[in-house]
Image (tube, rainbow, N blue to C red):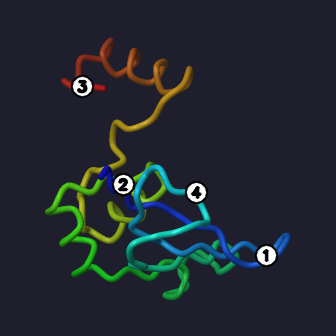
Amino acid sequence: MPVRIRLARMGRKHRPFYRIVVADSRSPRDGRFIEKVGTYDPLLPDDHPDRVRLNEERIRYWLSVGAQYTDRVARFLDKAGIVPGATRYRGTGKRAQELAARRAEQGDGAQG
């Protein structure tokens, strides 16, 4: 069973609130999940302590058994120090390819 750590949207229209959940990658975004491991409230200021809350112990457990994380969750994990450098070279699309090409030209040894 492929397991992912991802966001599940809660709240109402124009008032988003997200749970950070561990779920089977085939289940719906807001549907069934295995475990809730945190919350994210984008309406709070960046420096507010309740903007992102993580259960670090459980996240480390799920990562140890092979769970993958989404790009947005990777930013949270990087900022919290759980997975340092998780967002450094992640991304898809035209802009990410341009940045990877620019890094390769500069020769800073980055692999993307």
Q: Are marks 4 and 1 in contact (CB under 8 Å)?
A: no
- The answer to whether residue 26 is left or right of residue 42 is left
Q: Residue at x 44, y 49 (%)?
A: 71
Residue 11 location, x and y as percent?
Answer: 73, 79
To which residue does mark 3 refer?
A: 111
The one nearer the camera, 74 or 21, is 21
What distance separates the C-alpha of mark 1 from that of mark 2? 24 Å
Front position among marks 4 and 1:
4
Residue type beneath disc 4 = Pro
- The answer to whether residue 88 is left or right of residue 13 is left
Closer to the chain start, of discs 4 and 1, is: 1
Q: Quadrant of residue 42?
A: bottom right
Residue type beneath disc 3 = Gln
The one nearer the camera, 110 or 32, is 32
Residue type beneath disc 2 = Tyr
Residue 101 location, x and y as percent?
Answer: 39, 15
Q: Are marks 4 and 2 in contact (CB under 8 Å)?
A: no
Front position among marks 4 and 3:
4
Residue 84 location, x and y as percent?
Answer: 23, 57
What distance separates the C-alpha of mark 4 from that of mark 2? 16 Å
Q: Residue at x 65, y 80 (%)?
A: 44
Residue type beneath disc 1 = Arg
Closer to the chain start, of discs 1 and 3, is: 1
